[in-house]
Amino acid sequence: EQFSTYGPYYTEHVKGYNSGEDIQSLAGAGWLPFVSGLRDKSDPLKNYTGYYINNCLNSGDGAIFRHFTNGTERLYMMDKTELVSIFASKQYISDNYVSLEEYTSNVYAFGCRSQYTDQWMKDNRIKSYFSACLTLTSMYQGGTLSLNGTNPSHNAMTIREPQRNTTDRIVLAHEKDLILIVDAVDTSVIPQEVKDKARFLYADIPAAYPYDARSWDEKMRYCYRLISQYKNYAKVVITSRIHVGLPAAALGTPVIFISKNGWLPGGHERTGRVAGLLDVFHRVDEVRGLPWTFGNLEDPVPPNPGNHYADRFRASFWNRLKRNEYYADAAKLFGRIPLQRLGAGMHRSEIQNKFHFIMQPSDLLHWQQRRAVESILFHHPNAKVYVHVDIDLGPLDWGDFGVFMESGYDVQVLRLNRNELIKEARHIVRGRIHENDSTLLAGMLVYKHGGVFLAKNIYAIRELSAFLNAGYTKDTVGNITMMVGEQSSVEVLKYFSTDDKEPRSAPRPSSSIAWEVKVLSKSESRSCQVDLAWDLELTDFVAVSIDPQSLVENDIFYESRCYDIIEKHCIYCDDLHWEYVPL
């Protein structure tokens, strides 16, 4: 098999050549088992039938599959091509509608780098989702560099062989203490004290670069030096380029992104190139009321505020690319999986951090239940989520839930021993217990572990405070929808005693917060899914219970209320579970 990335073999004129194109190419190449060749970005599939990750569509004429006039051959090639992380213009989408619609109808939804592209695709009824940029999956270890008398700003340092310890890990003989300024569009907002001690670099290969940069190999060395400095040397990167900021953030380095009333080196934000991407970074734009608040940068810079946001996109990229067994095997072989989440250390004590679901083993194969867990992790990314099932299951038997562990989320599938829980409940209560199995099991899980129990058809729509009132709610047939309580709480014991058959909310300190779950009937659930005029006020609710049978029997239409509830609070948003309203 062949696996290719894109990039020019040779460029005659390199003065001002923007390395951002190659940084994007490297992001795609990082998922390949090996690179067997380079493709011309403007026509990558000409005389080629290998695998290709296309994360940068050309805005010129023609569809990329135009050489495959035979329908069977074209679909075969479409299946070997990943259209991810793409910014495309309105005109491109209009000119190539037939090809794009054929791809999304037969292969996979179109991953859009820009929210603008995503909306333009949806305006044309082409299946798409906002994927952000593939450079967020940059996971290079980088190298160690030696100046050897070179000008640091020329980015021409010698790439040294890494020193290794006995565990074969790269040893850095320096601290990450560099302040890197890379193409900041407005340096006047940066304190002079910071600029005096910073290293200035450029995404464009400078005219004074001492090597012949016309070959692809030398361009890759230039990129590798940049990445190595982001990863192994920089305490912070200050930039106005997304293909500097995104890989630096992906490598765990704080990024301060500077714009000037929306202006960037490549043009204004309103062109849509960066729509949805800048939320990853710390931001500075004085004209827009975002001043410099970082002092002289002597103290450590806080982690990027959008780390959890970036983690969702990284997880979604993995969920999509793992469909290809070559990419999946390579990712595991080279240690990319499990993903190391950027926000793993950003814990918040003011929100709930432990959740419980009870499911059947077959539920682990259903998207509806996975979306329920996704809705929790969307709002509580560092939470521990326990999925309790009736039998012992190893990670290989987790079905569609295995992707949570692969993505770095703390989701565990545990055996639920119902008989033991009932026996333990009788011992604790020392009397009769609630006959409703749902109430008993939920109550015992919360009593033993604390946290929040949720029914498997519950979708969280906002954060759940750590100070929620203890208590529970039920659906129309008397099953628990949600229960909140502290570990070993006396109040929780009352929930599964025979004297407590009605929904209740136990009193807590005045600082506690009331909560409610909106339970939709089957007919309401159908309206929520298919009637675009049907509305639902959810201001006073923390979660919504949607009838599971309705989710099986009816599609979720784009822009319906259930689209907002389920498909906008997802982690694996590449896996679409909605349709356009039939014309």
Image (cartoon, rainbow, N blue to C red):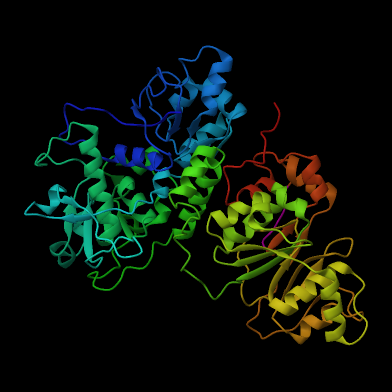
Q: Magenta stretch: dominant SS? A: loop
Q: Nearer the viewer, residue 396 or 271?
A: 396
Give the magenta part as a residue range.
Answer: 535-539
Q: Residue furthest front?
A: 166
Residue 144 image-quadrant placement: bottom left
Tell me how many marks there are.
0
Residue 220 image-quadrant placement: top left
Residue 305 relative to residue 243: left or right: right
- Magenta stretch: includes residue 127: no
Q: Residue at x 79, y 71 (%)?
A: 442
Q: Residue at x 26, y 65 (%)?
A: 176
Give the position of the C terminus as an image quadrant.
top right
Q: Residue at x 56, y 32 (%)?
A: 123
On screen, residue 323 above or below 348: above
Residue 10 relative to residue 361: left or right: left
On screen, residue 156 above or below 63: below
Residue 4 relative to residue 423: left or right: left
